[in-house]
Image: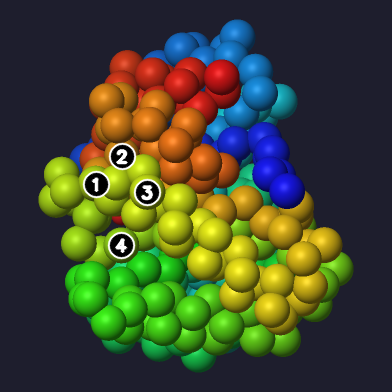
Amino acid sequence: MKIVQTPLIIGNWKMNPQSVKMAEALFKDVQKGIARVRGVDVGIAPPAVYFSGLEKLAKGKRMMLVAQDVFWENLGARTGEISAPMLKSLGVSAVIIGHSERRALGESDEDVNKKILATLKTGLDAVVCVGEKKRDTHGDYLSLVEKQVRAALAGVSKAKLSHVVIAYEPIWAIGTGNTATSSDAHEMKLFIQRVISDIYGRSVLSRIRILYGGSVNAKNAEELCTKGEVDGFLVGGASLRASEFITIIKIASK
Ligand code: PGA
């Protein structure tokens, strides 16, 4: 059974651009470029310091605000952290959790799980990143992704699954220009679906979008959509160039 979902494209700006002015200009350019594009959900994940300015621009329009991280407690002595209710109060509707750049700073599968539970409890969507450092011929990378998915979803009820998105982001493809092939992406989508259906049953698969991320650009997006059959993209570098990001969104909308 082929399950067709509305594609989701999220631009992960990471620690860019350098000023609030530049962030607002980029946001406006993308918004303008996709004003008439239908059939695709679009999110922007800027540095959190830009949310309050962007919230005003996003209001009533179709671009959603996405956070790049969250902490699992709501309030308290946690210097530097931001909680899910705080993000919600700024108009944020989803959070990227477990990005490999955060895992590289020490975030564990358990931390990722706590962040997911806190995010879902607050009524935000969780965009959970999984992916291997390198590929091997024994299939160890599959076991690693399975472990990440199972750990991420521990304690997540079936009812909450429509608020979960999985982003498969092989680390070797992030920021390197080495995109996964459409068959790599497709194989991994099917594999992740199998892991999820093992836990929850096949019926839930229509509720979880599985994105691909890692050097997505205007040239490879089409094949990743059509042959890779992914449900959208998490786009890093290319999301900082408005016209390229708009092209990717348009490709996904078809
Ligand atoms: P990239 O980043 O598109 O620049 O490879 C993707 C990501 O890290 O989410």
Which is more toward the observer, 190 or 18?
Answer: 190
Separation of disc 2 and disc 1 at Cα? 7 Å
Separation of disc 2 and disc 3 at Cα? 15 Å
Which is more toward the observer, 147 or 201?
Answer: 201
List the single residue furthest toward the top: 36
Q: Quadrant of the C terminus?
A: top right
Residue 4 lies left or right of residue 187; in this view the side is right
Percent position of residue 133, x then y: 23, 72
Residue holding disc 3: 183
Percent position of residue 43, x then y: 53, 39
| Kind of element beneath mark 4 | loop
First in sequence: mark 2 vs mark 1: 1
Task: Point out which mark residue 216 bears.
Answer: 2
Separation of disc 4 and disc 2 at Cα? 12 Å
| Disc nearest the viewer among 4 and 3 | 3
Q: Are marks 2 and 1 in contact (CB under 8 Å)?
A: yes
| Disc nearest the viewer among 1 and 3 | 3
Separation of disc 4 and disc 3 at Cα? 14 Å
Residue 238 lies left or right of residue 113; in this view the side is left
Task: Point out which mark residue 179 bears.
Answer: 1
Which is more toward the observer, 24 or 228?
Answer: 228
244 versus 4 height, above or below: above
Q: Amino acid at mark 1?
A: Thr
| Kind of element beneath mark 3 | helix
Which is more toward the observer, 223 or 157?
Answer: 223
**Residue visible at 55% across and 54% down in the picture:** 210
Separation of disc 1 and disc 3 at Cα? 11 Å
| Kind of element beneath mark 2 | loop
Separation of disc 1 and disc 4 at Cα? 9 Å
Residue holding disc 4: 170
- Sort mark 1 into few (<14), some (14-19) or many (20+) by Cα contacts within 10 Å: many
